[in-house]
Structure formats: C-alpha cells, structure tokens
Amino acid sequence: MQYKLVALRKEKNETQEQIAKLIGISEAAYRNKENGKTQFKIYEMFDIAKHFGLGIEEIFLPRKYTLCEQSKKIKEG
C-alpha cells in the first residue's frame, strides 16, 4: 500500500476518483494501485508527484518497503 500517497491525497482533500482522472485511469484501477495490488507506471508517478509539487521519491515507497520500516523512519525523522 502506498501509505504516503494515501495520507497526502487525504490531506489535500482529494478523492481516488480525482487522482484517477488526473492520470487517465478508472477509479477501480487507481484503487488497486494505491492499495498495492498493482504497480503505478513511472509516468503515473511523475504526473501525481507534479500534481502535488513533490518528487516521486517523496511520495512513492519502494516495492518491498514495509509499514514497519516507514513507521521507524517517521519516528527518526
């Protein structure tokens, strides 16, 4: 699951439907990507990062990055 993306989207009061439209996919397809069932394509990551004014590395977690590792980084941060 893309925890940082979910948090950012909610912080900006944007829906899954809005981000799905931004990158040109269905809401269901977006939901699968956000939940980690399918992977974002690189151009989708760049479009989302640009939309939020951030770099892709600031939003998207590496494929094998666990919630435990993310929580540890946040606490250290």
Image: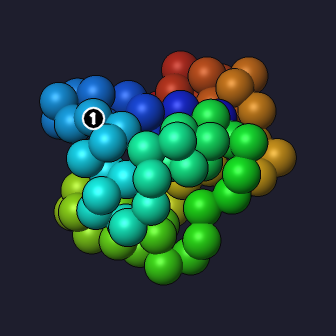
Label 1 belongs to which residue? 15
Left or right of 17, for residue 33 = right
Q: Position of residue 16 (x, y in %)?
A: 36, 38
For residue 76, say whether it is visible: no
Quadrant (top left/top right/bottom left/bottom right) for the N terminus: top right
Of residue 28 and residue 5, the one placed in the foreground of this image is: 28
For residue 37, say whether it is visible: yes
The residue at 32%/51% (across/down) is 19
Q: Secondary structure at mark 1?
A: loop
The residue at 21%/36% (across/down) is 14
Examine the image and state in which quarter residue 76 appears. top right
The amino acid type of the residue labelled 1 equals Thr
Left or right of 11, for residue 8 = right
Of residue 62 and residue 39, the one placed in the foreground of this image is: 39
Q: Position of residue 44 (x, y in %)?
A: 46, 70
Of residue 46 and residue 57, the one placed in the foreground of this image is: 46
The residue at 30%/58% (across/down) is 21
